Image (spheres, helix red, strand yellow):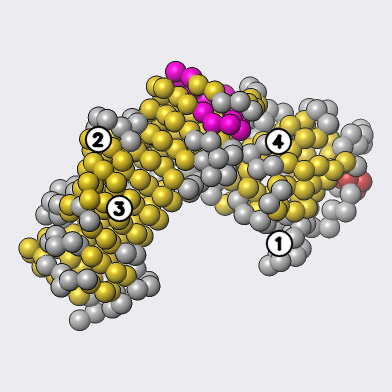
C-alpha cells in the first residue's frame, strides 16, 4: 500500500502511473482518462452519469484483496471520471475507492480527502490476477480515450498555436500565452495557480476540456467557440481591439468585456456580466444574474432579443434596447438603476424589484401576476 498528496491540477502518482485530476469541491473531483487506464464496473456501489462524466463509488472495498473475491471483472474507459472522497457526509456509504487496471498493473485508489493542500489518497497495486478468470477487456465501443501523452510544465510558456488532439493532457502551473489559436479537439488543457491564460482565438470541441484551477483569469483577444463542458471559473475577459464573437454554449461565472471594439455572442449565461469598455451584444435568450455597465461600456442586445436578468442591473454607461425585451425574473430582491436609459419592453416577473428611478419603456411594461 502507498499514500500520496497531490495539488489540484497536478498528478495522482501511483508508481509509474500518473493520472491528471482536478477538484470539483471538497467532496468530489475529476480524473482524466489516459491510454491504457480503465476502471472496474463491479461492486454494490452506484454508477451514474453527471455532466457527461462517468461517476462510480464503491462500497465495502477495504483493500485490494477484495478484487480477488470478484469474478468476471469488466473494465471500461472514460475521458473524465467523477470520484467521491470517503468524507462525503450526505453519502457515508460512498467510500470513494476505484478499482483500476493500467497495462499490467491492477490496483485500487482510495480517495480519502480533498482540502486546501490538495487530494489525499492511498493505493494498492501489483496484485496478480487469477488466471482462471476470463480476461477483462474494454469493449471497443467504449474505447473513447486515445491518449498520446500527459505534458506538465512548471514554467511560463508561449506558443503561436496549440492544438490538443488524441486525448493528450497539457498541465501548466505557471501561466500560458498563445498568440494565435488554441484548439482543444480531444483532450484537456489544465491551468493551475494564479497565473493567467492569454489567448487570441479558442475553440473547444465536444471531446475537449478546458479546466481552470486556482485564481487564473483567461484573457481572450479573438473569438471563442465552445462545444463542450467549460467549468465555471473566476473570470474570462474579452479584450480585443477588433470585433469578437462568442459562439457555442458556455456558462461563464464572471464575464468581463474590456474591448476597444465590440463583442457579439450567441445565447450565453453568466453569473456576473461586467462591461468595462466597448459594446457587448448578447444573443436572444441570454441569462445573467448581475449586470454592471461602466461609464465607457455599452450593452446592446441583439435585434429584438429577450435577455433575462436575475439579479441587479446597474447602468453607468449606455444601454441600447435595440427593440428588445429585458425580463427581470430573479428569485431574490433585485435592484435596477438604468441611469436614465429606457427599455423597449420590460417584463417584471417577480414582485421584489427596486428601481432607483421609475422605469421607462418605449413599448410596454408587463408586470406578471397582475
Nearer the observer: mark 2 or 3; the answer is: 2
Left or right: residue 126 compared with residue 341: right
Whether 43 is drawn above or below 313: the answer is above
**Could you give the CA–CA distance between mark 3 and mark 1, rounded to whole angstroms?**
35 Å
Left or right: residue 22 compared with residue 285: right
For this rendering, which residue is in front, 269 or 58?
269
**Could you give the CA–CA distance between mark 2 and mark 1, rounded to whole angstroms?**
47 Å
Question: Which percent across, then down, holds residue 95?
Answer: 77, 57
State the residue position of label 4: 11
User: Which stretch appears magenta?
Assistant: 159-176
Q: Earlier in the sequence, mark 2 or mark 3?
A: 2
Nearer the observer: mark 2 or 1; the answer is: 2
State the residue position of label 3: 286
Left or right: residue 154 compared with residue 12: left
- Locate the C terminus by quadrant: bottom left
Q: Label 1: few (<14), some or many (≥20) within 10 Å?
A: some
Q: Earlier in the sequence, mark 3 or mark 1?
A: 1
| SS class, disc 2 | strand
Nearer the observer: mark 3 or 4; the answer is: 4
Contact between labelled residues 1 and 4, with CB atoms less than 8 Å apart: no
In the image, farthest residue toward the front: 295
Question: Which percent across, then down, holds residue 253?
Answer: 43, 51
- Residue 47 visible in the displayed image: no
State the residue position of label 1: 88
SS majority, magenta: strand
State the residue position of label 2: 260
Q: Earlier in the sequence, mark 3 or mark 4?
A: 4
Amino acid at each position: 500500500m502507498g499514500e500520496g498528496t497531490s495539488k489540484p491540477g497536478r498528478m495522482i502518482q501511483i508508481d509509474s502511473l500518473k493520472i491528471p485530476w482536478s477538484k470539483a469541491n471538497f467532496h468530489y473531483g475529476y480524473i482524466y482518462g489516459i491510454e491504457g487506464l480503465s476502471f472496474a464496473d463491479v461492486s454494490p456501489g452506484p454508477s451514474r452519469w453527471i455532466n457527461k462524466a462517468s461517476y462510480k463509488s464503491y462500497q465495502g472495498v477495504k483493500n485490494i484483496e477484495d478484487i480477488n473475491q470478484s469474478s468476471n471483472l469488466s473494465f471500461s474507459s472514460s475521458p473524465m471520471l467523477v470520484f467521491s472522497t470517503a468524507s462525503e457526509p450526505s453519502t457515508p456509504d460512498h467510500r470513494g475507492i476505484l478499482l483500476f487496471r493500467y497495462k499490467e498493473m491492477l490496483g485500487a485508489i482510495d480517495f480519502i480527502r480533498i482540502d486546501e493542500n490538495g487530494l489525499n489518497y492511498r493505493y494498492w497495486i501489483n496484485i496478480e490476477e487469477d488466471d482462471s478468470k476470463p480476461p477483462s477487456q474494454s469493449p471497443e465501443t467504449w474505447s473513447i480515450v486515445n491518449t498520446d501523452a500527459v505534458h506538465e510544465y512548471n514554467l511560463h510558456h508561449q506558443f503561436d498555436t496549440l492544438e490538443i488532439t488524441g486525448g493528450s493532457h497539457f498541465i501548466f502551473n505557471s501561466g500560458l500565452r498563445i498568440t494565435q489559436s488554441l484548439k482543444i479537439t480531444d483532450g484537456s488543457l489544465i491551468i493551475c495557480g494564479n497565473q493567467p491564460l492569454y489567448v487570441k482565438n479558442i475553440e473547444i470541441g465536444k471531446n475537449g476540456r478546458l479546466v481552470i484551477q486556482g485564481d487564473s483569469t483567461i484573457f481572450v483577444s479573438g473569438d471563442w467557440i465552445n462545444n463542450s463542458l467549460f467549468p465555471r471559473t473566476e473570470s474570462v475577459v474579452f479584450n480585443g481591439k477588433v470585433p469578437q464573437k462568442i459562439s457555442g454554449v458556455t456558462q461563464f461565472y464572471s464575464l468581463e468585456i474590456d474591448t476597444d471594439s465590440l463583442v457579439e455572442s450567441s445565447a450565453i449565461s453568466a453569473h456576473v456580466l461586467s462591461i468595462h469598455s466597448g459594446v457587448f451584444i448578447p444573443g436572444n435568450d441570454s441569462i445573467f444574474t448581475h449586470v454592471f455597465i461602466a461609464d465607457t461600456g455599452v450593452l446592446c442586445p441583439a435585434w429584438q432579443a429577450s435577455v433575462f436578468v436575475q439579479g441587479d442591473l446597474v447602468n453607468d454607461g449606455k444601454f441600447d434596447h435595440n427593440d428588445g425585451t429585458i425580463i427581470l425574473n430573479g428569485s431574490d430582491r433585485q435592484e435596477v438603476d438604468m441611469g436614465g436609459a429606457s427599455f423597449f419592453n420590460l417584463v417584471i416577473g417577480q414582485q421584489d424589484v427596486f428601481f432607483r428611478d421609475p422605469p421607462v419603456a418605449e413599448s410596454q411594461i408587463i408586470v406578471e401576476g397582475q
